[in-house]
Image (cartoon, rainbow, N blue to C red):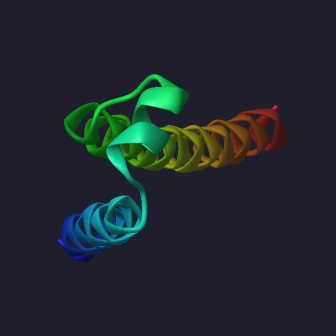
Amino acid sequence: MLNKIYRAIVISRTKTATINTLAHLSERDLNDMGISRASFIEAQVESVIAELDAQDREAANTKMRKQIEASAKRLFAAV
């Protein structure tokens, strides 16, 4: 549950920071970069979501490895 709250806060802050950044950019600046306001926000949010998903996968993999190592130790200790 705390992980979901954390994710929501991070995503919300990303949107807010992106909107604040866009407030300082003109349409010409955005056109020079080849992006629109909407696509910039979406890209930043998607990037943060991808990073959070990668962290979640890494944490799950680490947990799984520890469980496998513990099982292997018990198995070989019994032999």
Camera-side residue of 38 and 57: 38
Please name the residue shown 66% across and 39% down the image. 65
Quadrant in which the N terminus appears: bottom left
| Left or right: 48 in relation to 42 | right
Residue 13 vs 18, above or below: the answer is: below
Please name the residue shown 33% across and 43% down the image. 27
Choose top left, top right, bottom left or bottom right for residue 28: top left
Residue 52, image x, y percentages: 44, 49
Residue 12 vs 51, above or below: the answer is: below
Residue sitting farthest toward the top: 34
The number of discs equals: 0
Quadrant in which the C terminus appears: top right
Choose top left, top right, bottom left or bottom right for residue 72: top right
Camera-side residue of 60 and 37: 37
Residue 42 vs 14, above or below: the answer is: above
Residue sitting farthest toward the front: 28
Choose top left, top right, bottom left or bottom right for residue 3: bottom left
Residue 24, image x, y percentages: 41, 67
Camera-side residue of 2 and 42: 42
| Left or right: 11 in relation to 17 | left
Camera-side residue of 16 and 36: 36
Residue 41, image x, y percentages: 29, 45
Please name the residue shown 46% across and 22% down the image. 34
